[in-house]
Amino acid sequence: MLRNLVLHRPDVRIEIDLNSRSRDGYTLARLSRADGPVLVDDDVVVFEPDDRVAAPARVVRVDREHDFAFLDVDWSLLREDLAYGKSPRPILSGVIGRLSNSATGVTMRIRETQQTWIGDFVEVAPRPVYGIVAP
Amino acid sequence: MLKAATGELVLVRFSPMNQDRFVRQATDDADYRESLGEERIWAISAYGDCLGEGETVEALVSRICEEAECGGPRIWLITGGTLSREGYDAVLSEPPPHHYDVIIGSELGTEDRSRLVESVGKLAGLFGPGREKNPAC
C-alpha cells in the first residue's frame, strides 16, 4: 500500500501585505519573501503573518530584476493560516511520520524511506485517503 | 467607531499595522515606482470611499470591506481629513476598486532612513486608535 504513495510538493509560500497592489490591480510581493522558486503560472500560497491568514494565488508575472511577483489572489478563499510557523523542510530517510486521515480518524505510520516534506499532502492508493505528514 | 462628515473620505487599512511593516511596504512601493521609470515616492496602500448622504460610517466601512478585493479579520480606520491635517495625501489609485495610496513623501532617500521611519511611525500612530473588526469577515 505504501508503495503507492503519491507526494505533492507543497506550494511556495509568499508573505504579502494584504493592501498592496500593482498598477494593474494584482497583489504586489517581493520574490525574496518567498520560500521557494516562483515561476509564472505557478500556484502559490500568500500569507500575512500578523493576522495569520493565507489564500491561494496564481503567479501572473515576475520581475526578477526588481524582485517583484505579481499575484492573482483568490480572496474568497482567505482563511486562517494553519501552516504558519511550520516551514517545510526535506526529510530524506527513515520513518518519516504519520499519515492521518481527518475524515476517518485513522492514523498510520509511514515506514518506507521516502523523500517528502513536512506538510505534504499524501494520497494512498488503491483506497485513496488524504492527510498531512506530521513531523 | 470613527466619526466622519458627509462627503468625507474614510480609509480602511487591512493588516499589517506596525511601523516595521509600514516601512517595508513604503520601500516596496518606492522600488515599484522606480521599476516603472517613475519618481521614488514612498506610500502605503489602503481602501476607501466618501461617506454618502445619510450613510453611516458603519455602513460605509461594510461596503468598502465587501467591495475591496482584499480581506483579513482586522481593520484600521482613518478619515481623509485627519490625514490631510497631519500632512499626508490620500490618492485614488484603482484598480482594484477603492484602492488608495497614502503618500508619505518623495524625498526620503535611503541614506536618510530615519526620516522615513519617523514619518511612517507617525502615520501608523494615526491609524492605530481606529482598530475595528472587519464587518465582512
Image (spheres, rainbow, N blue to C red):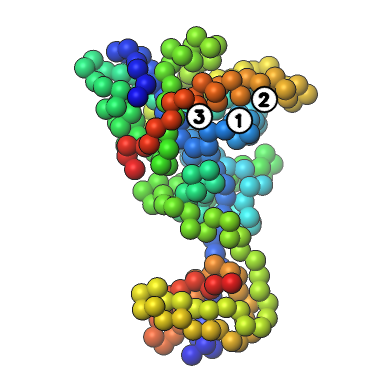
Give percent across and percent down for residue B17. Answer: 53, 33
Tell me which residue sits at (36%, 74%) in the image. A103
Relative to residue A70, is residue B27 drawn left or right?
A: right
Label 2: which residue?
B117
Labels 1 and 3: the sequence-earlier one: 1
Tell me the crowding category of disc 1: few under 14, some 14 to 19, or many 20 or more residues within 10 angstroms, Cα based. some
Label 1: which residue?
B19
Work out whether residue A87 or residue B35 is closer to the camera in this orientation and state it: A87
Q: Amino acid at mark 3?
A: Ser
Mark 3 residue element: strand
- Looking at the image, how many numbered discs can be counted on the residues? 3
Specify the quadrant of the image occupied by residue B70: top left
As drawn, which residue projects farthest toward the top? B85
Tell me which residue sits at (63%, 20%) in the image. B119
Q: Is residue B99 visible?
A: no
As drawn, which residue projects farthest toward the right? B111
Work out whether residue B108 or residue A26 is closer to the camera in this orientation and state it: B108
Q: Amino acid at mark 1?
A: Gln
Label 3: which residue?
B45
